[in-house]
Image: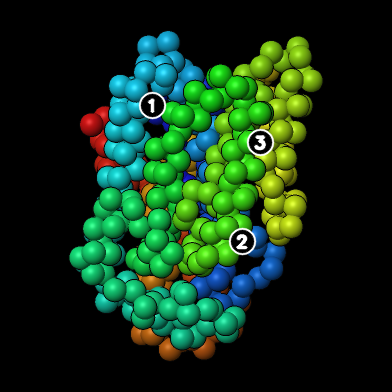
Amino acid sequence: MLVSGSATPGTTDKLAFINLFRALAAFWVLVAHCNIWGGWFHPIVPDAKIAVDLFMMISGYLMIANADRRWSGEPLSNPRNWLRFLVRRYFRIAPAYYVSLGLAVALGPLFLGGYDVLFDRSTIGLGQNVNPERIVYSPLNVLSHLTFLFGLHPTGSFSTFLPDWSLSLEMQFYAIFPLIMIAFRRFGPIRTALALSAVSALATYWVDAVTTFLEPSLLVFKLRYFLVGMLLYEGLRRDAATPIKFVSITAGALLSLGTLADAQMLIAPALLLAMAFSGYREKRNGPNRLTGSRFVTFASDSSFGVYLFHGFFISAFGLLLSAMPELTAMSVPRQTVLMLIFVAPLSYIAGALSHRWIEIPGVAL
């Protein structure tokens, strides 16, 4: 997320604070996309990609938490356990994603048509990269998405109009995660994370100099965010009586962000520190009324489905605009707010249904 990373059953009850941040990230993406496609683009709403970065931090945290919990029985130092890990992750992500991809292809003219209405009506100068007319659901395009390899190609990173570029990132991360986990244990978490972040920064500079990706779907662009989540876990698992270790690992996580020239310079570290504080409090006192509430649990469980399916309802609102002149007569801010009111509840219904009938059976399988 997903974006999309999530704990396996039996883990989230011990990581209630993660539920809160997963719920926040999904709602953030939903609001930000309504803000953009509604045409208002109010500056108070941060970029949706920052929320996706938060999903990546969460994914890094959960992957190392799950691997650490299973290490005694399934150590990733044994290559035979790598396949078990990859199969689990595939069945966590693929079933719901394949449903969303199938819907996008089956409803292609309607799905892209709704976005086309919003694109033509936009007053904020949306670039041609997000022009629905450039999307073609060719057999090769669909196959690249079924295999999750689309993120390795500059134009394939955004070629379905789904927010799926981060899912290819997730799969790339899963492919190398066992090696990172082994390096964490052999060379130490901070040393490993900083070294990999340096390599990532150099590779990012080189790749940007060669070609342009429509979305940052290549792992080198975002590896540091997964590493930050892993470092956060390492910090929180340390003995609370030795705060210097906790502070040093959190500082290492901040350094490994490497975004000093980025607009996210303040937001990403602030989110990390908020997660660190929430996790520390939960470790000492257990889940609080907010993180342990049914509302947060529901929003967290629905988060992956919300992320995958909210675009269909944004598109549907575009189709409503083309069919109802009374909507088009409204001011842009009112249209944007109305879009959010229309999209949000339907997205959470779809997310809840996806969790119950697709994601849970996929994990069980």
Question: Are the residues at dot 1 and dot 3 in contact (C-beta closer than 8 Å)?
Answer: no
Figure quadrant of the C terminus: top left
Q: CA distance from mark 1 to mark 3?
A: 31 Å
Frontmost of labels 3 and 2 is: 3
Task: Give the residue pinned by disc 3.
Answer: 194
Neighbour tally class for label 1: few under 14, some 14-19, many 20 plus, Cα within 10 Å: few
Task: Give the residue pinned by disc 1.
Answer: 9
Earlier residue among tags 1 and 3: 1
Neighbour tally class for label 3: few under 14, some 14-19, many 20 plus, Cα within 10 Å: many
Can see residue 134?
yes
| Residue in the picture at 53% in, 79% down | 126
User: Image quarter for residue 114?
Assistant: bottom left
Q: Which numbered disc covers residue 163?
A: none
Q: CA distance from mark 3 to mark 2?
A: 26 Å
Task: Give the residue pinned by disc 2.
Answer: 47
| Residue in the picture at 49% in, 23% down | 182
| Residue in the picture at 30% in, 26% down | 84
In percent of width and height, residue 81 lies at 33, 22
Label 1 residue SS: loop
User: Image quarter for residue 173?
Assistant: top left
| Residue in the picture at 57% in, 58% down | 206
In percent of width and height, residue 53 lies at 57, 49
Frontmost of labels 1 and 3 is: 3
